[in-house]
Protein backbone atom coordinates (compact mmCIF):
# COMPACT_ATOMS: atom_id res chain seq x y z
CA UNK A 1 0.00 0.00 0.00
CA UNK A 2 1.30 3.44 -0.97
CA UNK A 3 0.37 6.99 0.08
CA UNK A 4 -0.35 10.03 -2.11
CA UNK A 5 0.99 13.52 -1.46
CA UNK A 6 -0.04 16.83 -2.95
CA UNK A 7 1.78 20.15 -2.98
CA UNK A 8 -0.27 22.44 -0.69
CA UNK A 9 0.83 25.49 -2.66
CA UNK A 10 -0.72 24.22 -5.91
CA UNK A 11 -2.80 21.14 -5.11
CA UNK A 12 -0.72 19.17 -7.64
CA UNK A 13 0.28 15.56 -7.03
CA UNK A 14 3.85 15.23 -5.75
CA UNK A 15 4.07 11.45 -5.53
CA UNK A 16 1.93 8.38 -4.96
CA UNK A 17 4.82 6.02 -4.29
CA UNK A 18 5.56 6.36 -0.55
CA UNK A 19 4.96 2.96 1.07
CA UNK A 20 3.12 2.29 4.31
CA UNK A 21 5.17 0.06 6.59
CA UNK A 22 3.09 -2.88 7.77
CA UNK A 23 3.53 -5.45 10.52
CA UNK A 24 6.26 -7.37 8.69
CA UNK A 25 8.23 -4.16 8.03
CA UNK A 26 7.92 -3.00 11.63
CA UNK A 27 9.01 -6.40 12.95
CA UNK A 28 12.03 -6.38 10.63
CA UNK A 29 13.04 -2.88 11.75
CA UNK A 30 12.63 -3.71 15.45
CA UNK A 31 14.59 -6.96 15.04
CA UNK A 32 17.42 -5.10 13.32
CA UNK A 33 17.36 -2.42 16.02
CA UNK A 34 17.57 -4.97 18.83
CA UNK A 35 20.45 -6.74 17.09
CA UNK A 36 22.25 -3.40 16.83
CA UNK A 37 21.71 -2.84 20.55
CA UNK A 38 22.90 -6.30 21.62
CA UNK A 39 25.78 -6.56 24.08
CA UNK A 40 29.06 -6.67 22.22
CA UNK A 41 27.64 -5.04 19.09
CA UNK A 42 29.63 -2.32 17.30
CA UNK A 43 27.22 0.31 18.66
CA UNK A 44 27.40 -0.88 22.26
CA UNK A 45 31.20 -1.09 22.18
CA UNK A 46 31.74 2.18 20.32
CA UNK A 47 33.81 4.73 22.24
CA UNK A 48 32.32 8.02 23.35
CA UNK A 49 34.66 9.87 21.00
CA UNK A 50 33.57 7.79 18.00
CA UNK A 51 29.88 8.18 18.85
CA UNK A 52 30.35 11.93 19.26
CA UNK A 53 32.11 12.18 15.90
CA UNK A 54 29.33 10.14 14.26
CA UNK A 55 26.64 12.56 15.44
CA UNK A 56 28.77 15.53 14.40
CA UNK A 57 29.29 14.05 10.94
CA UNK A 58 25.55 13.49 10.57
CA UNK A 59 24.96 17.13 11.56
CA UNK A 60 27.46 18.21 8.90
CA UNK A 61 25.63 16.15 6.28
CA UNK A 62 22.33 17.79 7.23
CA UNK A 63 24.04 21.15 6.85
CA UNK A 64 25.48 20.18 3.48
CA UNK A 65 22.10 19.02 2.13
CA UNK A 66 19.98 21.65 3.87
CA UNK A 67 18.49 23.14 0.70
CA UNK A 68 17.47 19.75 -0.68
CA UNK A 69 15.98 18.63 2.63
CA UNK A 70 14.14 21.94 2.96
CA UNK A 71 12.71 21.53 -0.53
CA UNK A 72 11.44 18.02 0.28
CA UNK A 73 9.68 19.38 3.36
CA UNK A 74 8.37 22.48 1.56
CA UNK A 75 6.62 20.62 -1.26
CA UNK A 76 4.51 18.69 1.26
CA UNK A 77 4.27 21.22 4.12
CA UNK A 78 4.23 24.51 2.22
CA UNK A 79 6.28 26.53 4.72
CA UNK A 80 8.56 29.20 3.17
CA UNK A 81 12.30 28.60 3.59
CA UNK A 82 13.39 32.02 4.86
CA UNK A 83 10.44 32.48 7.22
CA UNK A 84 10.40 28.94 8.60
CA UNK A 85 12.38 26.24 6.79
CA UNK A 86 15.84 27.62 7.50
CA UNK A 87 15.19 27.86 11.23
CA UNK A 88 13.70 24.38 11.26
CA UNK A 89 16.79 22.84 9.69
CA UNK A 90 19.08 24.87 11.95
CA UNK A 91 17.22 23.39 14.95
CA UNK A 92 17.89 19.85 13.74
CA UNK A 93 21.57 20.50 13.01
CA UNK A 94 22.19 22.21 16.33
CA UNK A 95 20.47 19.42 18.26
CA UNK A 96 22.78 16.79 16.81
CA UNK A 97 25.80 18.98 17.58
CA UNK A 98 24.54 19.89 21.05
CA UNK A 99 23.87 16.30 22.11
CA UNK A 100 27.11 15.09 20.55
CA UNK A 101 28.78 17.33 23.10
CA UNK A 102 26.84 15.67 25.93
CA UNK A 103 28.01 12.13 25.15
CA UNK A 104 31.00 12.11 27.50
CA UNK A 105 29.49 14.53 30.02
CA UNK A 106 26.20 12.88 31.06
CA UNK A 107 27.66 11.37 34.22
CA UNK A 108 26.26 9.04 36.82
CA UNK A 109 26.49 9.44 40.57
CA UNK A 110 28.26 7.87 43.51
CA UNK A 111 27.63 7.98 47.26
CA UNK A 112 30.03 7.40 50.19
CA UNK A 113 30.38 3.98 51.79
CA UNK A 114 29.46 5.29 55.25
CA UNK A 115 27.39 2.15 55.86
CA UNK A 116 29.94 -0.20 54.32
CA UNK A 117 28.34 -0.11 50.87
CA UNK A 118 29.71 2.01 48.04
CA UNK A 119 26.80 3.23 45.97
CA UNK A 120 26.97 3.82 42.21
CA UNK A 121 24.14 5.12 39.99
CA UNK A 122 24.52 4.62 36.25
CA UNK A 123 22.25 6.12 33.58
CA UNK A 124 21.87 3.41 30.98
CA UNK A 125 20.20 3.48 27.56
CA UNK A 126 16.71 2.01 27.27
CA UNK A 127 17.28 0.12 24.01
CA UNK A 128 15.01 0.47 20.99
CA UNK A 129 13.39 3.90 20.86
CA UNK A 130 10.76 4.87 18.28
CA UNK A 131 10.17 8.52 17.46
CA UNK A 132 6.82 9.37 15.90
CA UNK A 133 7.14 12.89 14.58
CA UNK A 134 4.59 15.46 13.34
CA UNK A 135 4.28 17.02 9.91
CA UNK A 136 4.61 20.66 10.97
CA UNK A 137 8.37 20.57 11.63
CA UNK A 138 9.65 17.13 10.63
CA UNK A 139 13.38 17.78 10.53
CA UNK A 140 13.43 19.80 13.76
CA UNK A 141 11.43 17.05 15.47
CA UNK A 142 13.93 14.48 14.21
CA UNK A 143 16.69 16.43 15.93
CA UNK A 144 14.73 16.83 19.15
CA UNK A 145 14.13 13.07 19.41
CA UNK A 146 16.88 11.19 17.59
CA UNK A 147 19.83 13.27 18.81
CA UNK A 148 19.39 12.72 22.59
CA UNK A 149 18.30 9.11 22.05
CA UNK A 150 21.44 8.27 20.06
CA UNK A 151 23.69 10.35 22.30
CA UNK A 152 22.69 8.24 25.30
CA UNK A 153 23.40 4.99 23.43
CA UNK A 154 19.92 3.95 22.32
CA UNK A 155 19.02 2.78 18.84
CA UNK A 156 16.35 4.78 17.04
CA UNK A 157 13.50 4.16 14.60
CA UNK A 158 12.05 7.30 13.01
CA UNK A 159 8.41 7.23 11.89
CA UNK A 160 7.56 10.44 10.00
CA UNK A 161 4.05 11.79 9.59
CA UNK A 162 2.04 10.54 6.66
CA UNK A 163 1.55 14.17 5.63
CA UNK A 164 5.25 15.06 5.23
CA UNK A 165 7.49 11.98 4.86
CA UNK A 166 9.79 12.96 1.98
CA UNK A 167 12.52 14.60 4.05
CA UNK A 168 12.71 11.60 6.37
CA UNK A 169 12.99 9.24 3.41
CA UNK A 170 16.03 11.20 2.24
CA UNK A 171 17.71 10.78 5.63
CA UNK A 172 18.34 7.10 4.90
CA UNK A 173 21.23 7.89 2.56
CA UNK A 174 22.72 10.32 5.04
CA UNK A 175 22.50 7.77 7.86
CA UNK A 176 24.53 5.33 5.75
CA UNK A 177 26.96 8.00 4.61
CA UNK A 178 27.57 9.12 8.19
CA UNK A 179 28.57 5.58 9.12
CA UNK A 180 25.93 4.49 11.63
CA UNK A 181 26.15 0.71 12.15
CA UNK A 182 23.24 -1.19 10.55
CA UNK A 183 20.05 -1.03 12.60
CA UNK A 184 21.14 1.87 14.81
CA UNK A 185 19.20 4.63 13.03
CA UNK A 186 16.30 3.60 10.78
CA UNK A 187 13.39 5.30 8.99
CA UNK A 188 9.96 3.71 8.57
CA UNK A 189 7.42 5.55 6.42
CA UNK A 190 3.78 4.94 7.13
CA UNK A 191 0.51 6.21 8.55
CA UNK A 192 -1.20 5.90 11.91
CA UNK A 193 -1.30 2.11 11.62
CA UNK A 194 2.50 2.03 11.47
CA UNK A 195 2.73 4.22 14.57
CA UNK A 196 0.28 1.93 16.37
CA UNK A 197 2.42 -1.12 15.54
CA UNK A 198 5.47 0.59 17.04
CA UNK A 199 3.59 1.80 20.12
CA UNK A 200 2.29 -1.71 20.83
CA UNK A 201 5.43 -3.64 19.92
CA UNK A 202 6.77 -5.79 22.73
CA UNK A 203 10.40 -5.25 21.72
CA UNK A 204 10.30 -1.44 21.63
CA UNK A 205 11.46 0.14 24.90
CA UNK A 206 10.22 3.70 24.44
CA UNK A 207 7.98 5.85 22.24
CA UNK A 208 8.54 9.56 21.85
CA UNK A 209 5.49 11.07 20.18
CA UNK A 210 4.61 14.58 19.08
CA UNK A 211 1.10 15.24 17.79
CA UNK A 212 -2.51 15.63 18.86
CA UNK A 213 -3.95 14.86 22.28
CA UNK A 214 -6.28 12.06 21.05
CA UNK A 215 -3.45 10.27 19.23
CA UNK A 216 -1.12 10.82 22.19
CA UNK A 217 -3.63 9.14 24.48
CA UNK A 218 -3.83 6.21 22.07
CA UNK A 219 -0.04 5.92 22.00
CA UNK A 220 0.09 5.92 25.80
CA UNK A 221 -2.65 3.30 26.00
CA UNK A 222 -0.93 1.00 23.50
CA UNK A 223 2.39 1.46 25.29
CA UNK A 224 0.81 0.51 28.62
CA UNK A 225 -1.14 -2.45 27.26
CA UNK A 226 1.92 -3.96 25.59
CA UNK A 227 5.13 -3.90 27.63
CA UNK A 228 4.66 -0.75 29.72
CA UNK A 229 7.18 1.00 27.48
CA UNK A 230 8.33 4.47 28.44
CA UNK A 231 6.62 7.38 26.70
CA UNK A 232 7.33 11.02 26.06
CA UNK A 233 4.34 12.94 24.73
CA UNK A 234 4.50 16.47 23.35
CA UNK A 235 0.89 17.26 22.52
CA UNK A 236 -1.25 20.26 21.69
CA UNK A 237 -1.47 23.78 22.99
CA UNK A 238 -3.76 26.79 23.25
CA UNK A 239 -1.11 29.13 24.55
CA UNK A 240 -2.07 32.42 26.25
CA UNK A 241 -0.16 35.66 25.71
CA UNK A 242 -1.00 38.22 28.41
CA UNK A 243 -0.26 41.88 27.69
CA UNK A 244 -0.38 44.25 30.66
CA UNK A 245 -0.92 48.02 30.44
CA UNK A 246 2.76 48.77 31.03
CA UNK A 247 4.02 46.45 28.28
CA UNK A 248 6.15 47.70 25.41
CA UNK A 249 3.41 47.85 22.79
CA UNK A 250 5.57 47.38 19.71
CA UNK A 251 7.38 44.38 21.17
CA UNK A 252 4.17 42.69 22.34
CA UNK A 253 2.48 43.17 18.96
CA UNK A 254 5.47 41.83 17.06
CA UNK A 255 5.77 38.67 19.14
CA UNK A 256 2.03 37.94 19.14
CA UNK A 257 1.67 38.41 15.39
CA UNK A 258 4.70 36.30 14.54
CA UNK A 259 3.61 33.57 16.95
CA UNK A 260 0.29 32.97 15.17
CA UNK A 261 1.49 33.40 11.58
CA UNK A 262 4.75 31.44 11.45
CA UNK A 263 4.16 28.18 9.56
CA UNK A 264 0.59 29.43 9.02
CA UNK A 265 -0.18 29.00 12.71
CA UNK A 266 0.61 25.28 12.54
CA UNK A 267 2.83 25.34 15.63
CA UNK A 268 1.97 23.54 18.87
CA UNK A 269 3.04 26.47 21.06
CA UNK A 270 1.49 29.26 18.95
CA UNK A 271 -0.02 31.96 21.15
CA UNK A 272 -3.55 31.60 19.85
CA UNK A 273 -5.13 33.25 22.92
CA UNK A 274 -4.13 36.90 23.41
CA UNK A 275 -5.34 38.80 26.46
CA UNK A 276 -4.81 42.57 26.69
CA UNK A 277 -5.39 44.70 29.78
CA UNK A 278 -8.17 47.22 29.25
CA UNK A 279 -5.97 50.32 29.56
CA UNK A 280 -3.93 49.42 26.48
CA UNK A 281 -6.51 47.30 24.69
CA UNK A 282 -7.65 49.78 22.01
CA UNK A 283 -4.12 50.80 21.06
CA UNK A 284 -2.94 47.19 21.00
CA UNK A 285 -5.88 46.08 18.87
CA UNK A 286 -5.24 48.81 16.31
CA UNK A 287 -1.53 47.99 16.05
CA UNK A 288 -2.15 44.25 16.10
CA UNK A 289 -4.67 44.44 13.26
CA UNK A 290 -2.35 46.64 11.20
CA UNK A 291 0.57 44.26 11.72
CA UNK A 292 -1.59 41.29 10.74
CA UNK A 293 -2.69 43.09 7.59
CA UNK A 294 0.97 43.66 6.70
CA UNK A 295 1.70 39.98 7.31
CA UNK A 296 -1.23 38.99 5.14
CA UNK A 297 0.35 40.86 2.24
CA UNK A 298 3.22 38.34 2.52
CA UNK A 299 0.87 35.35 2.12
CA UNK A 300 1.76 33.42 -1.00
CA UNK A 301 4.06 31.09 -2.89
CA UNK A 302 6.46 29.38 -0.43
CA UNK A 303 9.09 29.17 -3.18
CA UNK A 304 9.57 32.95 -3.01
CA UNK A 305 11.98 34.34 -0.44
CA UNK A 306 9.75 37.32 0.33
CA UNK A 307 6.84 35.07 1.35
CA UNK A 308 6.21 34.97 5.09
CA UNK A 309 3.04 32.83 5.23
CA UNK A 310 2.49 29.79 3.04
CA UNK A 311 -0.49 27.47 2.67
CA UNK A 312 -1.70 25.06 5.34
CA UNK A 313 -0.49 21.51 4.93
CA UNK A 314 -3.28 19.88 2.91
CA UNK A 315 -6.93 20.00 1.88
CA UNK A 316 -8.11 18.19 5.02
CA UNK A 317 -6.44 20.80 7.23
CA UNK A 318 -7.70 23.62 5.01
CA UNK A 319 -11.31 22.37 5.17
CA UNK A 320 -11.09 21.84 8.92
CA UNK A 321 -9.87 25.39 9.64
CA UNK A 322 -12.35 27.03 7.29
CA UNK A 323 -15.19 25.03 8.85
CA UNK A 324 -14.11 26.11 12.35
CA UNK A 325 -14.05 29.77 11.26
CA UNK A 326 -17.45 29.51 9.55
CA UNK A 327 -19.00 27.79 12.57
CA UNK A 328 -17.60 30.49 14.87
CA UNK A 329 -19.34 33.14 12.78
CA UNK A 330 -22.61 31.25 12.49
CA UNK A 331 -22.73 30.50 16.21
CA UNK A 332 -21.64 34.03 17.27
CA UNK A 333 -18.64 32.66 19.14
CA UNK A 334 -16.92 36.01 18.69
CA UNK A 335 -16.49 38.94 16.31
CA UNK A 336 -14.40 38.27 13.21
CA UNK A 337 -12.29 41.40 12.87
CA UNK A 338 -10.36 40.38 9.76
CA UNK A 339 -9.28 37.45 7.60
CA UNK A 340 -10.48 33.90 7.86
CA UNK A 341 -11.07 33.49 4.13
CA UNK A 342 -9.52 31.29 1.49
CA UNK A 343 -6.94 33.10 -0.61
CA UNK A 344 -6.13 32.42 -4.26
CA UNK A 345 -7.62 30.04 -6.79
CA UNK A 346 -5.36 27.07 -6.13
CA UNK A 347 -3.57 25.66 -3.14
CA UNK A 348 -4.65 25.77 0.50
CA UNK A 349 -4.10 29.38 1.58
CA UNK A 350 -6.01 30.99 4.45
CA UNK A 351 -5.87 34.66 5.41
CA UNK A 352 -4.90 35.07 9.09
CA UNK A 353 -8.00 35.62 11.20
CA UNK A 354 -8.57 37.73 14.31
CA UNK A 355 -11.60 37.08 16.51
CA UNK A 356 -12.38 39.51 19.34
CA UNK A 357 -14.77 39.37 22.31
CA UNK A 358 -15.03 35.59 22.15
CA UNK A 359 -17.36 33.61 24.38
CA UNK A 360 -15.56 31.75 27.19
CA UNK A 361 -17.10 28.44 26.14
CA UNK A 362 -16.54 28.99 22.40
CA UNK A 363 -14.77 26.32 20.40
CA UNK A 364 -12.35 28.85 18.91
CA UNK A 365 -11.52 30.04 22.44
CA UNK A 366 -10.99 26.65 24.08
CA UNK A 367 -9.75 24.25 21.39
CA UNK A 368 -6.50 24.14 19.43
CA UNK A 369 -7.18 25.14 15.82
CA UNK A 370 -3.64 24.66 14.46
CA UNK A 371 -3.99 27.38 11.90
CA UNK A 372 -3.68 31.16 11.50
CA UNK A 373 -6.55 32.00 13.86
CA UNK A 374 -6.16 34.07 17.04
CA UNK A 375 -8.70 35.12 19.66
CA UNK A 376 -8.12 38.48 21.33
CA UNK A 377 -9.88 39.52 24.54
CA UNK A 378 -9.50 42.17 27.22
CA UNK A 379 -9.03 41.75 30.97
CA UNK A 380 -8.94 43.93 34.08
CA UNK A 381 -6.92 42.40 36.92
CA UNK A 382 -3.93 40.13 37.36
CA UNK A 383 -5.88 37.54 39.36
CA UNK A 384 -8.61 37.44 36.73
CA UNK A 385 -6.19 36.79 33.90
CA UNK A 386 -4.26 34.09 35.72
CA UNK A 387 -7.51 32.22 36.32
CA UNK A 388 -8.61 32.64 32.70
CA UNK A 389 -5.22 31.66 31.29
CA UNK A 390 -5.08 28.50 33.39
CA UNK A 391 -8.69 27.51 32.64
CA UNK A 392 -7.63 25.18 29.85
CA UNK A 393 -6.78 21.53 29.34
CA UNK A 394 -3.58 22.69 27.66
CA UNK A 395 -0.38 23.80 29.38
CA UNK A 396 2.42 23.94 26.84
CA UNK A 397 3.40 27.62 26.57
CA UNK A 398 2.43 31.01 27.97
CA UNK A 399 3.73 34.54 27.67
CA UNK A 400 3.53 37.66 29.82
CA UNK A 401 4.33 41.15 28.57
CA UNK A 402 5.11 43.74 31.24
CA UNK A 403 7.90 46.10 32.33
CA UNK A 404 7.35 45.18 35.99
CA UNK A 405 9.84 42.42 36.84
CA UNK A 406 8.01 41.54 40.06
CA UNK A 407 4.79 41.04 38.16
CA UNK A 408 6.59 39.09 35.42
CA UNK A 409 8.04 36.63 37.91
CA UNK A 410 4.80 36.42 39.88
CA UNK A 411 2.66 35.70 36.82
CA UNK A 412 5.17 33.31 35.25
CA UNK A 413 5.09 31.29 38.47
CA UNK A 414 1.30 31.29 38.49
CA UNK A 415 0.92 30.08 34.90
CA UNK A 416 0.19 26.36 34.66
CA UNK A 417 2.41 25.64 31.67
CA UNK A 418 5.70 23.98 30.89
CA UNK A 419 7.32 27.06 29.34
CA UNK A 420 6.72 30.76 30.00
CA UNK A 421 8.09 33.67 28.02
CA UNK A 422 8.58 37.10 29.60
CA UNK A 423 8.21 39.81 26.95
CA UNK A 424 8.33 37.03 24.38
CA UNK A 425 6.24 33.99 23.54
CA UNK A 426 6.18 30.84 21.42
CA UNK A 427 9.84 29.88 21.43
CA UNK A 428 12.05 27.22 22.96
CA UNK A 429 15.73 26.98 23.83
CA UNK A 430 18.00 24.02 23.17
CA UNK A 431 19.49 24.16 26.67
CA UNK A 432 16.20 24.19 28.58
CA UNK A 433 13.47 21.57 28.99
CA UNK A 434 10.47 21.86 26.68
CA UNK A 435 7.16 20.14 27.31
CA UNK A 436 3.71 20.64 28.73
CA UNK A 437 1.54 20.26 31.80
CA UNK A 438 -1.97 18.81 31.91
CA UNK A 439 -3.01 17.33 28.54
CA UNK A 440 -0.18 19.02 26.68
CA UNK A 441 2.11 16.11 27.40
CA UNK A 442 4.38 13.98 29.54
CA UNK A 443 8.14 14.25 29.80
CA UNK A 444 10.51 16.84 28.40
CA UNK A 445 12.62 17.46 25.33
CA UNK A 446 15.76 19.61 25.03
CA UNK A 447 18.57 20.19 27.48
CA UNK A 448 19.80 17.63 30.00
CA UNK A 449 16.23 16.69 30.85
CA UNK A 450 15.87 14.98 27.47
CA UNK A 451 18.84 12.74 28.29
CA UNK A 452 17.07 11.56 31.42
CA UNK A 453 14.02 10.65 29.36
CA UNK A 454 16.10 8.27 27.23
CA UNK A 455 17.92 6.52 30.08
CA UNK A 456 17.13 4.32 33.04
CA UNK A 457 18.96 4.80 36.35
CA UNK A 458 20.62 1.65 37.63
CA UNK A 459 21.83 1.41 41.24
CA UNK A 460 24.89 -0.71 41.99
CA UNK A 461 25.70 -1.52 45.64
CA UNK A 462 29.26 -2.66 46.38
CA UNK A 463 29.68 -4.50 49.69
CA UNK A 464 32.88 -3.40 51.43
CA UNK A 465 32.10 -5.14 54.72
CA UNK A 466 34.26 -8.24 54.30
Image (cartoon, rainbow, N blue to C red):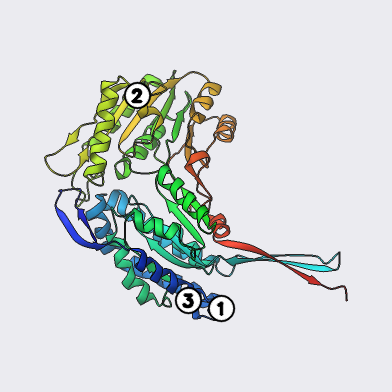
Q: Which residue is mark 2?
A: 285
Give how far apart the Cα atoms at labels 1 and 2 are.
Answer: 62 Å
Q: In which quarter of the view is residue 214 placed? A: top left
Residue at the image position 55 percent from the left and 75 percent from the top? 48
41, 345: nearer the viewer: 41
Q: In which quarter of the view is residue 19 placed? A: bottom left
Q: Which residue is mark 3?
A: 35
Task: Please determine whether, in this image, residue 280 is positioned above or below residue 369.
Answer: above
Residue at the image position 26 percent from the left and 42 percent from the top? 317
Instruction: Pinpoint residue 232: horizontal percent, then vertical percent.
Output: 50, 53
Instruction: Pinpoint residue 318: horizontal percent, then vertical percent.
Output: 23, 40
Mark 3 vs 2, N-terminal side = 3
Give how far apart the Cα atoms at labels 3 and 2 are.
Answer: 59 Å
Q: Which residue is mark 1?
A: 39
Quadrant in which the C terminus appears: bottom right
- Disc 3 + disc 2, Cβ < 8 Å: no
Q: Judging from the image, what secondary structure is the residue with disc 2 in? A: helix
Residue at the image position 43 percent from the left and 69 percent from the top? 30
Q: Nearer the viewer, mark 1 or mark 2?
A: 1
Q: Nearer the viewer, mark 3 or mark 2?
A: 3
Dot 3, how many residues are within 10 Å of its Cα: few (below 14), some (14-19), or many (20+)? some
Instruction: Pinpoint residue 464: horizontal percent, then vertical percent.
Output: 84, 73
Give how far apart the Cα atoms at labels 3 and 1 are.
Answer: 9 Å
Quadrant in which the N terminus appears: bottom left
Residue at the image position 44 percent from the left and 61 percent from the top? 130
Dot 1, how many residues are within 10 Å of its Cα: few (below 14), some (14-19), or many (20+)? few
Q: Judging from the image, what secondary structure is the residue with disc 1 in? A: loop
Amino acid sequence: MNMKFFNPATGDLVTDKIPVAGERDVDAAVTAANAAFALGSPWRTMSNVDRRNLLLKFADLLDRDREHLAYLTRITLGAPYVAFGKGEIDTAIENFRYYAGWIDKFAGESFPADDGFFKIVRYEPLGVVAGIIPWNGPLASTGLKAAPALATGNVFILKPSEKAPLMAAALGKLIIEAGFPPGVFQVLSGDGSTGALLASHMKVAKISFTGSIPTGKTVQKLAAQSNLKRVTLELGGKSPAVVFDDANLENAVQWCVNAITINSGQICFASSRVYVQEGIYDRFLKSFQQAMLEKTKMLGDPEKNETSIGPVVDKAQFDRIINIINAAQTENQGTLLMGGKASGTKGYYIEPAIFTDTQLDANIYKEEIFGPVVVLNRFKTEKEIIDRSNDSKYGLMAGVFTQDINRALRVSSAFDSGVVGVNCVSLINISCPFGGTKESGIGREQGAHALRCYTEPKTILVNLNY
